Amino acid sequence: MALDSFADRVLAWYDQFGRKHLPWQQQVTPYKVWVSETMLQQTQVATVISYFSRFMQFLPTVVALAKASQDEVLHLWAGLGYYSRARNLHKTAQIIVADYQGQFPETLQQLIELPGIGRSTAGAILSLAMQKKATILDGNVKRVLCRYFAIAGYPAETKVAKKLWELAEQLTPDQQINHYNQAMMDLGATLCSRSNPNCLICPLHADCQARITDSVKLYPTAKPKKVLPQKQVIMPLFKYQQAIWLYQRPNTGLWGGLWSFPEVADQLGLQEYAQQQGFTIANQQPLELFIHTFSHFQLTIQPMLVEVIASRNKLAETGHIWYNLASPPRLGLAAPVKKLLNLLN
């Protein structure tokens, strides 16, 4: 097979069936491509569309993003998860404004030196927004290539990833790079999907090795399964009049930079925390238990509504806030926190 026939078939398919009406494909800019590609990491297109539109409404340019507070950025991101992505967007926007006069760098090396921009995201910015020859290798493209060439092994393994990058670079054409890269992502997302791929109408079906050997379901090799560790925590919702006590988590680690409830191990820990903050507890009642699953563990949360009748902390210290339920501020809230605050409202 000539390599250009691969690209020709992909491009012909894209002309007829490729996605061209997603919000980040309209009046394309490096900023739109960067934000959308970052949001699409670990997240489905259907979920990202509304988040992207709202993000652009409030932060339409890289300059606006750089000037925004971290709380504003995290507030707009809340619910998408993997919050380091949002913090890195904010950092990188500030670097682009300070060091590049608000213009995106135009080389692969400069882009991948910025926080949160990896090789594939950099390739997307260069090719989709600047029409420069650059390769992408997101999860959708990996799936297409693993099946087409019947590449065994988990794609994140070093040897497999190296092979996939080599193939992706060889196959990327010299012309219509923006359409080709978008087409490869679309193929993986719409036809060569994780389950129930539609091989019969795929433009690559004639010589796809996985299809020929009837082994499509074997590729790409699944990530080795691990039993998720289980953790338990009590989250006290200290309520004083119409406000709930929140604290801001450190920028690193779980829910970095977001506002959350305190976490304690048991009732003794709850009492000790209340004493440290000068809270006088009038009443407490457990709310419905729920489980929140992270990529590396499962957290069982026992929310505890704790009514406070007096507090010496009527004005919260730095890093803490009395969150007014009637007139909530725009803050980045961890997903379970947002869920529980909505429940209280």
Image (tube, grey):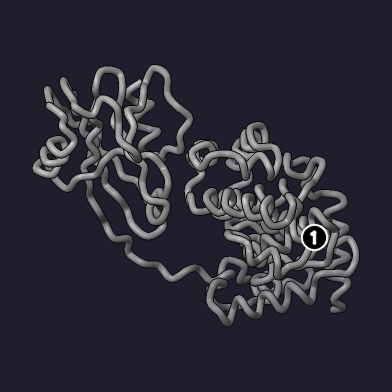
Name the residue at the right extreme. Answer: 175
Q: Position of residue 159 (x, y in %)?
A: 58, 82
283 or 202: nearer the eye? 283
224 horizontally vs 111: left or right: left
Instruction: In this rendered view, identify the residue nearer to me: 109 or 292.
Output: 109
Numbered label tally: 1
Residue 257 to residue 118: above or below: above
Picture coordinates of residue 301, whole percent (x, y): 26, 43
Quadrant where the N terminus sits is: bottom right
Q: Is residue 93 above or below residue 234?
A: below
Relative to 223, residue 166 above or below = below
- Which residue occupies 16% across, 20% down? 309
Residue 299 vs residue 261, the one in the foreground: 261
Quadrant of the snapshot with the C terminus: top left
Say what secondary structure mark 1 lies in. Answer: helix
Q: Residue at x 40, y 48 (%)?
A: 255
- Residue 168 showing in the rendered view: yes
Kindly indicate the quadrant of the structure image that contains residue 23.
top right
Q: Is residue 25 left or right of residue 197?
A: right
Q: According to the image, label 1 marks what residue? A: 127
Residue 103 in percent (x, y) is at 76, 52
Residue at the far left: name it. Answer: 268
Q: Position of residue 55 (x, y in %)?
A: 62, 37
